[in-house]
Image: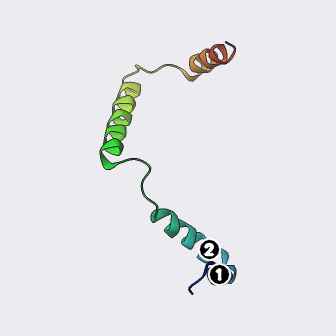
Amino acid sequence: MSTITEIQAAIEKLSANQKSALAAWLQSQEEPIMSEAEETALLARLDKAAAELDAGKGVPATRVRGQIRGWAGR
């Protein structure tokens, strides 16, 4: 299989499960959108946010929705 056309023809013959597996594999081959350091920092911030929510320091979703409506109306 040396051309895109041949690859596409072969993919058309795959079952739905095989196509799904191929799609997942192709996505795994892409370069990460963020660096490892950025991902580590993001995960640390998410852990901190989760801990704050668990401690009752969060903002209710209804309040956030109300604020968003106000921001969007500006």
Q: Secondary structure at mark 1?
A: loop
Q: Amino acid at mark 1?
A: Leu
Kindly indicate whether the residue at mark 2 contacts the one at mark 1 (C-beta within 8 angstroms). yes
Residue 37 vertical position relative to residue 69 in the rendered view, above or below: below
For residue 35, above or below residue 21: above
Residue 54 or 5: which is nearer the viewer? 5
- Residue drawn at x 45%, y 65% as measured from the top left: 29
Tell which circle, 1 or 2, labels the residue nearer the N-terminal end: 1
Q: Which residue is painted at 60% across and 15% down in the image?
A: 67
Q: Is residue 48 above or below residue 31?
A: above
Q: Is residue 62 left or right of residue 57?
A: right
Question: In the image shown, does 3 or 64 lie closer to the viewer?
Answer: 3
Q: CA distance from mark 1 to mark 2?
A: 6 Å
38 versus 71 height, above or below: below
Question: Which image quarter holds the N terminus?
Answer: bottom right
Inspect the image, locate mark 2, and give the three-letter code of the amino acid beneath it. Answer: Lys
Q: Find disc 1 in the rendering and name its residue.
A: 14
Label 2 residue SS: helix
The crowding category of the residue bearing disc 2, from other C-alpha atoms within 10 Å (few below 14, some 14 to 19, many at least 20), is: some
Residue 55 locus on image (x, y percent):
36, 23
Quadrant of residue 46 within the rendered picture: top left
Residue at the image position 38 percent from the left and 29 percent from the top: 49
- Counting from the top left corner in percent of width and height, residue 60 is at 53, 20
Farthest residue in the front direction? 3
What residue is shown at x 62% (from left), y 15% (from top)? 71
How many residues crowd around disc 1 within 10 Å: few (fewer than 14), some, or many (20 or more)?
Answer: few
Residue sitting nearer the eye, 53 or 49:
49
